Image (tube, coloured by chain):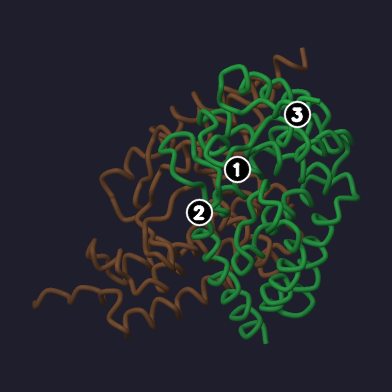
Chain colours: A green, B brown
Amino acid sequence: MTSARLEQQIRFLVEADKLKEVFRQTLCTQSRRAENDAEHSWHLCLLAIVLAEHANVPSLDLGRVLKMLILHDLVEIDAGDTYAYDQARMADQHAREAVAADRIFGLLPAGQGREFRAVWDEFEERRTPESKFAAAVDRFQPILLGCETGGVSWREHGITQDRVLARNAHIAEGCAPLWDYAVRMIQRAVEAGNLGPPPAAPAS
Amino acid sequence: MTSARLEQQIRFLVEADKLKEVFRQTLCTQSRRAENDAEHSWHLCLLAIVLAEHANVPSLDLGRVLKMLILHDLVEIDAGDTYAYDQARMADQHAREAVAADRIFGLLPAGQGREFRAVWDEFEERRTPESKFAAAVDRFQPILLGCETGGVSWREHGITQDRVLARNAHIAEGCAPLWDYAVRMIQRAVEAGNLGPPPAAPAS
């Protein structure tokens, strides 16, 4: 019994290895190659344990935050990475990812699959202090790497300051000091020419 | 004050990005490229949350296990990855990594740096139930990927079954069912010709 259950869990862990091949628009700081979802997820976990003291709710269940960050991108094995500024693909992102969640968490023994799915749903819904903080680090980290890599990816996609501010403002709901920091960092990126200024208003 | 502390923590998080460029001997299952330490660390975290129920001590502090797994390889930014079967480099591995730990955890605010260093020391010493379980998943995962990639890396380095068994037997100290599983998996790898059998005893 234990053995069949363990075998099923290990097949899930092998399937999860595919996350190392899902590439994002963010670049790594050293080689400037595209970051993959697996190493991104690790980096978020590190951000969470370093920055937890700054969370809006200081008595967070950090273990639950880490579970969310470890699991949150697994759906992208099927659904692919959706670039944060791709409005067309973002429209049906949650629907695509929910189908993926059914399949991927469904590989686990039933009770464990339901538990993990609930963790993923909590992350997606962003209503608890833990999910708001997890979402904050998930949104902050690409901005940090964007600034550290000279905004190459933003410039390539024609992303402007107003869109970065609008897309990521909910960082403040989980970790207000981190949003203050991000706003200053974004301003410096604009001043350095690494992120486009907002488009000028049309002449009236 | 908060701002200077946050700035110092963020510089640490940028330095940590280098872990994505430290490559291991293990191959990823899909592309068969070398796995890096950052995505390896994420995979271990996933193993930990999936397999915690099988730990020898079932009432583990899983949050502490995850902290160890998130932090345990950061020293390799300076010390490099030490292949588990490279006996020459393993001789001074801990000494090299301890110097790296001084520098890397020293980038953090002092109290936090000491706390993270203590987590790393606990992982290295392998005396607590949490560190024994963390070490078990850290040793099991490369065997799993080795088997899933046809033993390419073992064959390239001439690694034989007896060495894999000797090097990894302490998996049983943290998670006995996982060691039983590994032993069966290793046996199948030998039968499939993906891992060398033990060298024959010299004729007497």
Residue A118 position, x and y percent, is 83, 65
Q: Chain of mark 1?
A: A
User: Please, what secondary structure does the residue beneath circle 3 have?
Assistant: loop
Residue A23 position, x and y percent, is 52, 54
Three-letter amino acid code at the position of disc 1: His
Furthest-front residue in view?
A: A204
| Quadrant where the image shows the N terminus of chain A | bottom right
Furthest-left residue in view?
A: B204
Tell me, yes or no, whether the two marked residues, 2 and 1, touch with CB atoms within 8 Å. Answer: no
Q: Residues within 10 Å of mark 2 (few under 14, many from 20)?
A: many
- Nearer to us: label 2 or label 1: 1
Left or right of B146? Residue B123 is right
- Nearer to us: label 1 or label 3: 3
Give the camera-side residue of A113 and A139: A139
Q: Residues within 10 Å of mark 1 (few under 14, many from 20)?
A: many
Three-letter amino acid code at the position of disc 3: Pro
Q: Which residue is mark 1?
A: A43
At x 25%, y 74%, the residue is B196
Q: Quadrant of residue B113?
A: top right
Q: Which residue is mark 3?
A: A202
Q: Residues within 10 Å of mark 3 (few under 14, many from 20)?
A: few
At x 80%, y 55%, the residue is A123
Q: Which residue is mark 2?
A: B40
At x 49%, y 64%, the residue is B140
Q: Chain of mark 2?
A: B
| Quadrant where the image shows the C terminus of chain A | top right
